[in-house]
Image: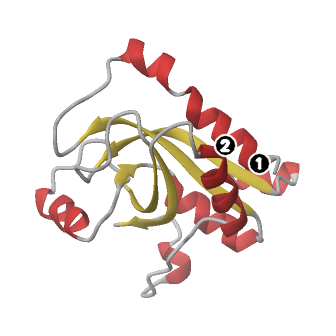
Amino acid sequence: MNELIKDYGAQTLIRIGSAGAMQERVKVRDVVLAQTASTAGSPSRTIFREMNFAPCADFDLLQAAWKAAQGKVATHVGGIYSSDTFYDEREDLGAQLMRHGVLCVEMETAELYTLAARYGRRALAVLTISDHLVTAEALPASEREGSFGDMVEIALEAAFS
């Protein structure tokens, strides 16, 4: 992301990818538009030190993605958790995130939003739920390939709106 901004002058960055649901109302195959991204640790911690910077999506991109999603797929907007570990072994943290309404977990958005803020760029994460931390439901790889098209269409429409 840093190189896309610095070396290529990227103005708009949209992450598309999978995520694990953390709320029962968020179902497998639903799309999540990440309004904010919490994290337990970040490469930017050395910059912010004791401050907890709250990275967020570009509002215009978020609004455009919301409009693009209407009538296509069940879509949720809200806070997500960007984790630097693939298999989190801290059940207490997951429970607190769920208690505070965090929609899902993934691995990149917090740093994407931080870099976008640092360089004055627009950023958004459009995520498809591939597995569920509450219900333990998960899409097999074959179904992941065929069910993520809505996310891509939403991201493209938002980028060019």
Counting from the top left corner in percent of width and height, residue 11 is at 82, 57
What's the image's color scheme?
A: secondary structure
- Residue that carries the numbered disc 1 in the rendered image: 159
Residue 28's place in the image compared with 94, above or below, is above
- Give the residue at mark 2: 155
Is 77 situated left or right of 126 in this image? left
Q: Nearer the viewer, residue 94 or 126?
A: 126
Tell me the amino acid under the disc marked 2.
Ala
Instruction: Decide which of 120, 66 is in the foreground and name it.
Output: 66
Q: Amino acid at mark 1?
A: Ala
The quarter of the picture where residue 102 lies is bottom left
* Disc 2, SS: helix
- Name the residue furthest top: 142
Residue at x 72%, y 49% (from the top left corner)? 158
Q: Residue at x 53, y 70 (%)?
A: 44
CA neighbours of label 2 inside 10 A, class few (<14), some (14 to 19), many (20+) = many
Residue at horizontal 24%, vertical 42%?
A: 87
